[in-house]
Image (cartoon, rainbow, N blue to C red):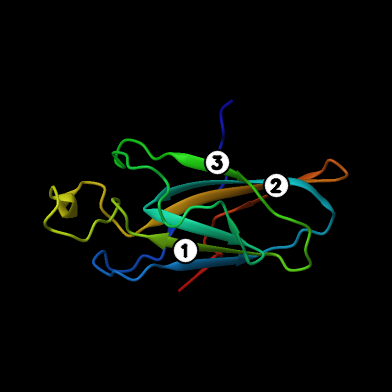
């Protein structure tokens, strides 16, 4: 099954040598009862995703796997989202191998892909009446 992304790649666009991890936030409306939801996320760097205050997955800034980021970026899919009045997504990005800060390890600080962490995400929601909604990463996300 092929996946066509609707989300844009977004970053905080800060200096490449900045070490603190950027946070991203998006509020959204899901006006009906949710039957199922899947979050598809591709990241340059490491990530943790929170929806309605609950962490998605059981990892701690360890995903996704290392790859040659200038050739391939892998994505992950997670089942998520419970019915709740509050609708908010939070993403925390870390540098990882994508923006490795050390000059002592295999010259990763000179990697051709090196940049601030970034991500692309689509949240696919199916409602109990079988209608669907996709919430994607775009320039409307707030960052800090």
Left or right of 33 in this view: 139: left
The tag on residue 79 is none
* Residue at the limit of the structure toward the right, as seen here: 129
Q: Residue at x 51, y 42 (%)?
A: 76
Q: Say whether marks 1 and 3 touch (CB < 8 Å).
A: no
The x and y percentages for residue 70 are: 29, 41
Where the C terminus falls, by quadrant?
A: bottom left
Lateral position of residue 116 relative to residue 78, left or right:
left
**Residue at numbered disc 1:** 92
Q: Circle 3 sits in a helix, a strand or a loop, which is it?
A: loop
Q: Position of residue 84 (x, y in %)?
A: 77, 63
* Residue ID for mark 3: 5
Real-space Cα distance between discs 2 and 3? 16 Å
In this view, the residue in front, 12 or 76, is: 76
User: Who comes first in sequence, dot 1 or dot 3?
Assistant: 3
Q: Secondary structure at mark 2?
A: strand
* On screen, residue 48 above or below 113: below
Indicate whether 98 appears above or below 24: above
Residue drawn at (36%, 53%), measured in percent from left and top?
A: 45
Image marks 2 and 3: residues in contact by CB distance under 8 Å: no
């Amino acid at each position: 099954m092929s996946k066509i992304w609707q989300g844009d790649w977004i970053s905080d666009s800060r200096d490449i040598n900045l070490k603190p991890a950027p946070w991203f936030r998006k509020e959204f409306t899901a006006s009906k009862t949710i039957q199922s939801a899947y979050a598809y996320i591709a990241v340059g760097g490491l990530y943790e995703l929170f929806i309605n205050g609950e962490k998605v997955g059981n990892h701690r800034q360890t995903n996704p796997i290392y790859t040659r980021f200038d050739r391939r970026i892998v994505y992950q899919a997670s089942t998520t989202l419970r019915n709740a009045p509050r609708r908010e997504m939070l993403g925390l990005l870390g540098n990882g191998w994508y923006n490795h800060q050390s000059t002592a390890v295999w010259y990763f600080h000179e990697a051709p892909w090196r940049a601030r962490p970034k991500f692309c995400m689509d949240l696919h929601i199916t409602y109990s009446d079988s209608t669907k909604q996709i919430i994607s990463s775009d320039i409307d996300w707030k960052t800090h």
